[in-house]
Amino acid sequence: MTTILDVQGVSKSFGGLKAVFEVSIDLEDGEILGIIGPNGAGKTTLFNMISGAIPADSGSITFDTTRIEHMKPHDIAGLGLVRTFQVVKPFAGLTIHENVLVGAFLRRQDPNEADEQAHKMMELTGLTPYAERSAQDVTLAIRKRLELARALATDPKVLLLDEVLAGLTPTEGVEMIDVVRSIRDSGVSVLIIEHVMAAIMALSDRIAVIHHGELLAIGVPASIVKDPRVVEAYLGEEFQIAPD
């Protein structure tokens, strides 16, 4: 497989606080890589550096073949790396359809082409029945899907998802997992932060564990749940698996 996102030794401090310290991860083309860790571990700071919201103090971030660690968010998005946010903020005065169109116009100037792209992404994320509903009058689960559809309308190669399952019911969570899988199957690589452990274990090809701003472990889910350091730092005893 080809590495599409390569993060090498990135660090970020805020005053005397080392929020992220020399973290290295890589995302393969067509992969879902989960990021887990306690609150305050540095996961969102890492996302912010990758997406351009804040610059890295040191280290390198390469997307495809381009160094992006000091690029602006809109320039990074234009290359094909797009993120969503835990707190969804749609354009409340617009419909679902119009919100997704905003994303589609990043790469398309022709209104008909943008509209076609918006409809494709609404179909992919299950939003077609809600297309003409106001974005402020739908449930959290639908707004979460809208966040995905708007990001996907920009034609990303990599999608960063920040706690896309947060606040959803178990049934809505299962449906969202199916949506994320369909996104990957459509050709988009996914980097996802999530606290719903059963979901992230089932969804991810590999998992990276961040603790106190450092990379504690990275590997396939089966190895992560057996790692004593991860169990002690984050997962807890209930995730320990008896030896074969």
Image (tube, rainbow, N blue to C red):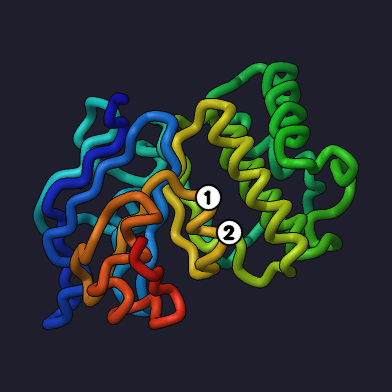
CA separation in Å, label 2 and label 1: 12 Å
Labels 2, 1: front one: 1
Q: Is residue 1 visible?
A: yes
Residue placed at 31% from the left, 31% from the top? Answer: 4
Are circles 2 and 1 on residues that touch, CB within 8 Å?
no
The disc placed on residue 203 is 1
Quarter of the figure that contains the C terminus: bottom left
**Side of 85 where 129 appears, left or right:** right
Q: In the structure shown, which secondary structural element does the residue marked by tag 1 occupy?
A: helix
- Find residue 120 and report its horizontal and vertical position in percent: 73, 27
Q: Is residue 74 above or below residue 140?
A: above
Q: Is residue 172 above or below residue 61?
A: below
Label 1 neighbour load within 10 Å: few <14, some 14-19, many 20+: some
Quarter of the figure that contains the N terminus: top left
Query: Is 125 or 170 nearer to us in this picture?
Result: 170
Q: In the structure shown, which secondary structural element does the residue marked by tag 2 occupy?
A: loop
Residue placed at 37% from the left, 65% from the top? Answer: 225
- Image quadrant assignment for residue 38: bottom left
Residue placed at 63% from the left, 61% from the top? Answer: 89
Residue designated by label 2: 164
- Find residue 90 and report its horizontal and vertical position in percent: 67, 56
Q: Is residue 175 above or below residue 171?
A: above
- Find residue 80 and report its horizontal and vertical position in percent: 42, 31
